[in-house]
Image: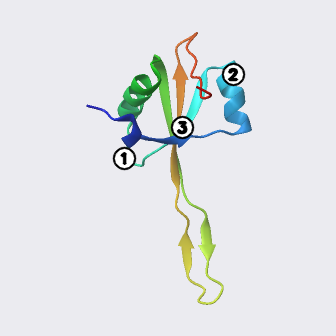
């Protein structure tokens, strides 16, 4: 049994994602690192009652940083985004 709250962290709202959702029908979600395309598809279909046509996944690496005192380098935490394309005519309403 797939639980959408164990796969989808949040909706990734930016200016570009708003344009994509209104014109193309693509929605962007921030997902957990262990999520796969199949589990993301099933979670979105179950949570929002829509038909998913395609799922693209992006792994963003955290930005490198350096400690000023010690000079040690580290990196910030990265994130995993999923761009979900819906079937023609399906819409996700986030205001409800």
**Few, some or many C-alpha atoms within 10 Å of disc 2 (few <14, some 14-19, many ≥20)?**
few
Q: Which numbered dot is residue 3?
A: none
Identify the residue at the far front of this view. Answer: 96
Q: Residue at x 53, y 56 (%)?
A: 78
Position of residue 61 measured from the top left corner of the image (x, y, whole percent): 54, 56
Depth check: give the residue in front, 48 or 77.
Answer: 48
Going from N to C along the chain, the mark reached first, 2 or 1, is 2
Determine whether label 2 and label 1 are within 8 Å by CB: no
Q: State the residue position of label 3.
A: 29
- Number of numbered markers: 3
Identify the residue at the far top of this view. Answer: 89
Quadrant position of the C terminus in the picture: top right
Looking at the image, is mark 1 or mark 3 nearer the viewer?
3
Alpha carbon distance from label 1 to label 3: 14 Å
Q: State the residue position of label 1.
A: 34
Position of residue 46 measured from the top left corner of the image (x, y, whole percent): 39, 24
Q: Which numbered dot is residue 22?
A: 2
Going from N to C along the chain, the mark reached first, 2 or 3, is 2
Position of residue 53 measured from the top left corner of the image (x, y, whole percent): 48, 18
**In terms of secondary structure, where does tag 3 sit?**
strand
Quadrant position of the N terminus in the picture: top left
């Amino acid at each position: 049994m797939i639980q959408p709250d164990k796969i989808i962290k949040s909706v990734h709202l930016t200016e570009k994602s708003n344009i994509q959702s209104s014109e193309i029908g693509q929605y962007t979600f921030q997902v957990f690192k262990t999520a796969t395309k199949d589990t993301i598809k099933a979670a979105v279909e179950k949570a929002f009652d829509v038909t998913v046509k395609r799922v693209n996944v992006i792994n963003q690496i955290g930005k490198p940083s350096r400690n000023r005192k010690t000079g040690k380098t580290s990196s910030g935490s990265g994130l995993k985004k999923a761009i979900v394309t819906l079937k023609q005519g399906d819409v996700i309403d986030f205001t409800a």
